[in-house]
Amino acid sequence: MIEEKGLHYHLKYRYEGMYKNGLEEGVWTITKTIRETIEPIDVLVSTMNFKKGLQDGELKIYDEEGETICLVVYEEGEQVDNLGEIVNVEEITRVLEDLSNNYVAIWKTNNIDDDENYCKGEGYLK
């Protein structure tokens, strides 16, 4: 079993988590730098749970105050629950302005059969 830290950037967002045997494992986070100073200020944008490279657990997207504006539940890579009252598309679009008008794009939640590296992102570290 090989475990290693994963870090990559996609459209000014920082993705960070762990790889186990080359696959995402555990909680991955997305942050964005909101102010470039001597000590950059980063804000938490999203968290997603993974098991063996597949989304498995909760996907959460947060606003600048840390309030959850989206909560979707995945099981073995498939969406099983979308808590509609929490999904605020207008707010998600505003928070993720540079990333996507579609919240699923932040974790590249496509069919894994179409592309085996779909979750690796830009700058994937092996």
Image (spheres, rainbow, N blue to C red):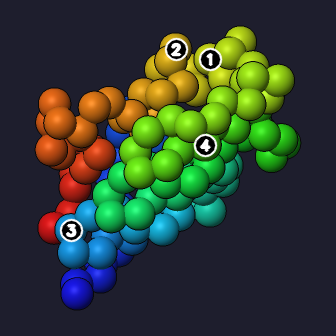
- Contact (Cβ within 8 Å) of mark 4 with mark 1: no
| Distance Cα–Cα, label 1 vs label 2 | 5 Å
- Contact (Cβ within 8 Å) of mark 1 with mark 3: no
User: In the figure, is residue 4 to the left or right of 95?
Assistant: left
x 29%, y 75%: residue: 20
- Dot in front, 4 or 1: 4
- Dot in front, 2 or 4: 4
- Which residue position is annotated with label 2? 101
| Chain-order first, disc 4 or disc 1 | 4
- Which residue position is annotated with label 4? 73
Task: Name the secondary structure under disc 1.
Answer: helix
Question: What's the amino acid at mark 1?
Answer: Thr
- Can residue 95 be seen? no
- Which residue position is annotated with label 3? 22
- Dot in front, 1 or 3: 3
x 56%, y 20%: residue: 97
- Contact (Cβ within 8 Å) of mark 1 with mark 2: yes
| Chain-order first, disc 3 or disc 4 | 3
- From the top left corner, tell me how far across and down residue 16 is, in percent: 44, 61
